[in-house]
Amino acid sequence: MKPITKIEIITRPEKLEELKKAMNNIKVTGMTVTQVYGCGLTKGHTEVYRGRQYSINLVPNVKVEIVVCEVPVEQVVEAAKTACRTGKIGDGKIFVYPIANAVRIRTGEEGDIAIIDPNDLEK
Amino acid sequence: MKKLSTIFSMCLVFILTLVPVVFANEAPIEPSKINSGDTAFVLVSAALVMLMTPAVALFYGGMVRTKNVLSILMQSFFVLGLITVQWVLFGYSLAFGPDIGHFIGSLDWVALNGVGQEPSSDYATTVPHMAFMTFQGMFAVLTPVLITGAFAERMKFSAFAVFILIWATFVYDPIAHWVWGAGGWLGEMGALDFAGGTVVHIVSGVSGLVIALMIGKRRGYGSDVMMPHHLPMTIIGAWLLWFGWFGFNAGSALAADGLATSAFVVTHVAAAAATVSWVLTEWAYHGKPTVFGAASGCVAGLVAITPAAGFVSTVPAVIIGLSGGIICFLAVAVLKAKLGYDDALDAFGVHGIGGAWGAIATGVFCSTAVNPAGADGLLYGNAGQVVIQLVGVAASCVTAAVMTYIIIKVISLFMEVRANAEQEIKGLDITEHGERGYAYQDFMVGSPITTSSSNAVSHHSLAKETALM
């Protein structure tokens, strides 16, 4: 069984479209997207309401989780880096995890065939 | 729950004792002195003032956190129902009925007995008595609604409802009688309050402050983030308030005439001037002009011009507005932070202080050239008027404060006044009303992870911050 890997990309919300396009270009079509809040080197901003000042230091981001088997992990990471980089603080992070098992719920398939696109198998 | 049932049953029994009044014999009808223009104007003004109650609800509602928005709306909505009924059953009689000792009205007009389609001989003599009564009824509803801002996000609804009923009867009705009732001692002393700077704004502001101090600050006040959850709602509320205020001030002329016109114009001008002055002051102070500031400024201006509306001319209105905006901004943004009390939505800062400033300004700028039935003020050679106005301010402040304190103390013997910590964290919408304001509210707005704060009192640092991320 080929190794299954999860790539987790946390980046700016406005980069989501570009990231999806970049992933589609390397034949990665499945992903799970969540809206998250986070901080790192980012300082956030300040808001004032009738004299009360609030420092908002958790900044909205998106987390895109991609699980791949056939597509090389380095290819995914490179494409994500290129798509999401702006050069300024707040670009985000990419984390790579090994996956022990995967299941396609519809068919009950387990292992690498759960990740692989059935169309690609026929070739 | 059992105590609530007892209270409601007692109210029901009380109402049933009034049934015989319905069958009392009416007096013979005299030839009508009704002016149709005046009547139309008073009725429309009453409707405009009614609109101010939902407007205040929206204004306050947008300012609280998501989990408490319905509690604000419910408090306002319920008061509209509760005080309307109280007003027609006995509130109007206590406030405007035949005088007893210059202190209170008698119960002669209970259940509007004697208040019919013919004009009153004392009030608004060219419109049906019921028109005057219902116009005043909208004021009686609005005043308690203004208080809700002070104890927002932490007062239990049951205690609130009981408090409002008692407060309306023992604070609003007597003070309204003192200022506006035939024979009321403040009115007879010469205190000028055209549309309710004292009766409505000072009284509600001070009462609110007392409750806020008695029930204490919100959990996490000063450290947790408590941002307005829906500023567009607040702005809509402010705009509707401005619109309704034309009925509040101009309608208080009780006639469709030159005085009403003058009151209309100065109301608009003061609101506009205060909007500008609050925005500019905040811009200088915090580095950015805010729409929340614009909305707050317009309300401050409207409050300040309220007692003066039928006594001052245009230029004084501009001055009252400009200064009202600055004074209320400082009260809200500086004084409150320094003293540390949790008047959540600035009922005292805007209505209490704005109303007091307006009452004093009336004593400075009033002129018999505008309204012969008024008086001349400090600028026209009569410094005594300011003193009279100060007496009115002091009397209403003290009465409102003392009575509110007593009422809350008494109520607290029978029921919880403040929501406990768990209820406050969960939010009053769920715990008091079993409802949620927004279907998605747990996932998006208002959830604790959207913001985390370090609250800074210093205002100079903000001016440098512009870039996001």
Image: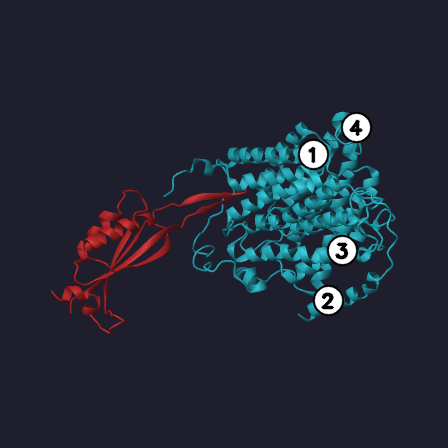
Chain colours: A red, B cyan
Q: What residue type is labelled 4?
A: Asn
Q: How crowded is mark 2: few (under 14 residues within 10 Å), some or many (20 or more)?
A: few
Q: Can residue B136 be seen in this view?
A: yes
Q: State the residue at coordinates (87%, 59%).
A: B25
Give the distance between the C-alpha atoms of the residues marked 2 and 1, in whole angstroms. Answer: 45 Å
Give the distance between the C-alpha atoms of the residues marked 4 and 1, in whole angstroms. Answer: 25 Å
Label 1 marks which chain's residue? B
Of mark 2 and mark 1, the one earlier in the sequence is 2
Disc number for residue B88: 3
Where residue B22 appears, x then y in whole percent? 82, 61
For label 2, the SS is helix
Q: Residues within 10 Å of mark 1 (few under 14, many from 20)?
A: some
Give the distance between the C-alpha atoms of the residues marked 3 and 4, in whole angstroms. Answer: 39 Å
Q: Which amino acid does label 1 sit on?
A: Thr
Q: Which amino acid does label 3 sit on?
A: Val
For label 1, the SS is helix
Between circles 2 and 1, the one closer to the viewer is: 1
Q: State the residue at coordinates (75%, 67%).
A: B12
Give the distance between the C-alpha atoms of the residues marked 2 and 4, in whole angstroms. Answer: 51 Å
As displayed, is residue A77 above or below residue B333? below
Disc number for residue B261: 1
Q: What residue type is labelled 2?
A: Ile
* Residue position marked by numbered label 2 in the rendering: B7
